[in-house]
Amino acid sequence: MAGEASGPDFAAEPALADAIADGTIDVGDRHLALRTRRIGQKAVLAHEMGIPDVVGIDAVAAPVNELVAAGFTPVGIAAAIDWPGDAVEAVRGGLADGATRAGVPLR
């Protein structure tokens, strides 16, 4: 039907659906992987303890660790921050610190 969105046919390509659900996809001789991290209760505790930078460090360390453990080489970190205004800079600093420690650029 005209105007419908087109995309992969997951029923015809179950391996593609599984790969996307797993966060990995093969592209020729390359393999792309994506990991996301939402830090909930840990963020609340860090805020209460006055150490919001730890949230940023952990937001980098956890997905990078998962990628490395799966045999991937992380090439970057993308981050979105939803944090009370008074602590955003500390969380950003933690993200930068975590990216530096992990040896990946923060995008």
Image (spheres, grey):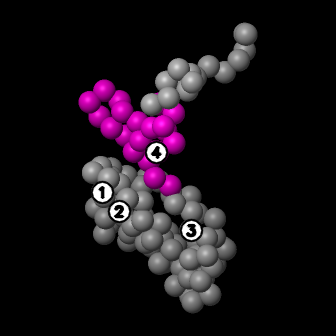
Q: Could you tell me if the residues under marks 2 and 1 are in contact, i.e. CB atoms within 8 Å?
A: yes
In the image, is 52 to the left or to the right of 4?
left
Q: How many marks?
A: 4
Which numbered disc, 4 or 1, marks the residue that appears first in the sequence?
4
**Picture disc at residue 1:** none
Residue count near mark 4 (Cα–Cα under 10 Å), binned few <14, some 14–19, many ≥20? few
At 71% across and 17% down in the image, what residue appears?
Answer: 4
**Residue 26 percent coordinates (x, y):** 36, 33
**Residue 65 percent coordinates (x, y):** 35, 62
Q: CA distance from mark 2 to mark 1?
A: 5 Å
Q: Could you tell me if the residues under marks 3 and 2 are in contact, i.e. CB atoms within 8 Å?
A: no
Q: CA distance from mark 3 to mark 1?
A: 20 Å
The part of the chain drawn in magenta is 16-36
**Picture disc at residue 39:** 3
**Picture disc at residue 68:** 1
Q: From the viewer's side, name the closer residue of 20 and 86.
A: 20
Q: Which residue is mark 2?
A: 65
**Residue 60 percent coordinates (x, y):** 42, 64
Q: Is residue 16 above or below residue 76?
A: above
Which numbered disc, 2 or 4, marks the residue that appears first in the sequence?
4
**Residue 92 percent coordinates (x, y):** 50, 69
Amino acid under label 4?
Gly
Q: Which residue is mark 4?
A: 23
Which numbered disc, 3 or 2, marks the residue that appears first in the sequence?
3
Q: CA distance from mark 2 to mark 4?
A: 14 Å
